[in-house]
Amino acid sequence: MNYGFVKVASAIPSLKVADCTYNIQQIESLIVQAEGKGVEIIAFPELCICGYSCQDLFGQQLLLEKCEESLFKLLDFTRSLQIISIVGMPVMVGGLLMNCAVVVQGGKILGVVPKTFLPNYKEFYEQRWFAPSTATNDTQVHLCAQTVTFGRNLLFHTQKTCFGIEICEDLWAPVPPSSELALKGAEIIFNLSASNELIGKHQYLLSLISQQSARCIAGYVYSSCGFGESTQDVVFAGNALIYENGTLIARSKRFSLEEQMVVSEIDTERLLTERRHNTTFAENTRLNTQFSTVDIQCQTVNPSYDFELTRWINPHPFVPGGKALDERCEEIFSIQTSALAKRIVHTGARSIVLGISGGLDSTLALLVCVKTMDLLQRPRKEVIGITMPGFGTTDRTYQNAMSLMKSLDITIKEISIKEACIRHFLDIGHDINNHDVTYENCQARERTQILMDVANQCNGFVVGTGDLSELALGWCTYNADHMSNYGVNTSIPKTLVKYLVKWVAMTSVDEDSKTTLLDIIETPISPELIPANLDGTIQQKTEDLVGPYELHDFFLYHFLRLGFRPAKILYLAEQAFIKQTYTDTTALGMEVGKYDEETIQKWLKTFCRRFFTQQFKRSCLPDGPKVGSVSLSPRGDWRMPSDASSADWLADLDD
């Protein structure tokens, strides 16, 4: 299975202006290379058969005949090939000459799409030679002894996708043809272009394609003229670009003197999921523009080719790299503090109360509380941090909790839960040596009772510390750490929590707090509800019990954000964590070869099973700020029946 991936290519051949024979040979060479890589659809630059820079030579009958003669050669060349090729050439339509994209497969012309918007300003004079698509009502054209479907509003349907075409300046129009093509079902847009280079233009182009692919919720494959087209006053650098819903997934090298081809896969299944969720997109589909469809019957990929994914799959989809990570942390922290400030002001709370364990989640919540008080210009002493040592509390986490509260200058309370839990065990007749779920949950609920009652005493409210990853797995005790008056971390995945804490440590706290925060980041994640080892170290490590959070966050993103089936998530996880070469992700703590297929599948099954069985906890979550595109709030992003069966999702991994 290809899981909805369509392998596409954007090619920049080595061309000579007005030398159709040479140009078609270069195009054929790249088509063969693409076919060998399993490419299903390949796009070439605008007017590539003759060259975009021909100027008044477009009025020469010989050039037009050579273009059609070269297209004949291409048809013969592709007769035994399954790959779909999109090439550019001038085409006579009645008495008009039009700048067109010609779609070819298996020796046949599938359709011809004319350019709609012809630039006629500054260095561009296209209206001198060409007529726009709106100049004719013809729906067929005779080309290379074939009668072919013709028009700007063509949709090409293959067995795997639907695609449309626009040409260069069409993209720059206020309402590009691709907008209508996408609304009528095109999942991928191909753009044959001849955009010359100017200072600042390239960044604008990237922004334009990114925005259009995002607006259309589509893949966008862009191919623009290269070195061979440069002549007189215009310079072409060659841009082969592949985008998916606003994200750049492949690009060529600019100003290369050689031919280039970039290959990647567009996830049409993801695009369709995004469109289903986006009600604004659905509303726009009511536009009444008439479209013609071209059904491509034959298979669009070489059946002997073993599909291989070449695009990069981010193993940490919630965590951006480089400077973007700092920007992400700053924005999230600002959302958290602003949200908490609003709740404090609205309730008139005189204090806020939270439990401090010395772990990552409570640390982040504490930092948010402190910075919120600074934002409101209120004393930090109105933050009441309570450490509640239990049977599993280690000296490391206890000391970190105390040190951090002292250095941040908040009100500190220490209330041991041991005696209360022992009393409770006696009341319910539970053996204290039986370290089962009752033993653990008793401690968690005792802590929550303390927090709620202290909040009542202080005319305040309890700030929750649990994060998104824990909620997805149900790794919280019902009506204990599961509950609070306001949960500031509920939309933040575990893999991002550590970077938020580190960002605060490196940017906005004193040296003592920084030292403590850095040690907390390195502390194993644990609820500390089971007694420590004999040497005082943590015995109950969360990731040993439910699996690595970096895997679960990967599963969560693709399951919740994109709606992928488990088999596809497994396939992507194997690509992300096993098969691909790591670059900047090693800076995020990625260990090459850390997991094998069996391990990933094991924890994915755990994720699916727990995600379904633990929904009842998410159905009654307290308020908390949404900070990203993935949330489990029952009031917003996720409404799921608590009694839904996971059987089909688990079975999908066994097929």
Image (tube, rainbow, N blue to C red):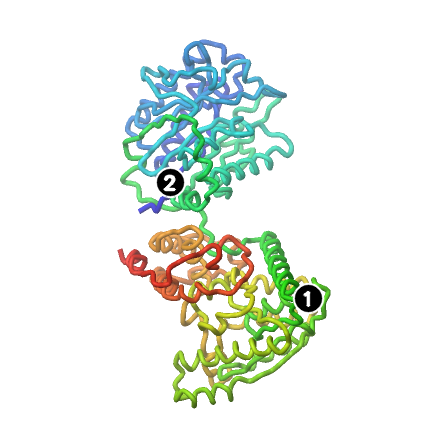
Whether residue 258 is visible: yes
Q: Position of residue 438 (x, y in %)?
A: 40, 80
Q: Which residue is mark 2?
A: 6
Q: Secondary structure at mark 1?
A: helix
Q: Amino acid at mark 1?
A: Met
Q: Position of residue 373 (x, y in %)?
A: 68, 66
**Depth order, front residue of 636/346:** 346
Calculate the distance from the C-alpha at mark 2 to the C-alpha at mark 1.
51 Å
**Depth order, front residue of 513/271:** 271
**Quadrant of the image containing the C terminus:** bottom left
Determine crowd level at label 1: few under 14, some 14-19, many 20+ residues with C-alpha closer than 10 A. many
Q: Which residue is mark 1?
A: 373
Q: Position of residue 569 (x, y in %)?
A: 38, 54
Q: Amino acid at mark 2?
A: Val
Q: Position of residue 215 (x, y in %)?
A: 50, 39
**Depth order, front residue of 583/300:** 300
Q: Tell me the residue at 39%/58% (across/down).
A: 640
Horizontal relation, residue 582 to residue 299: left or right: right
Count all numbered tags in the image, as a single digit: 2
Q: Tell me the residue at 40%/78% (across/down).
A: 437
Whether residue 400 is visible: no
Up-down: is 328 above or below 210?
Answer: below
First in sequence: mark 2 vs mark 1? 2
Determine crowd level at label 2: few under 14, some 14-19, many 20+ residues with C-alpha closer than 10 A. many
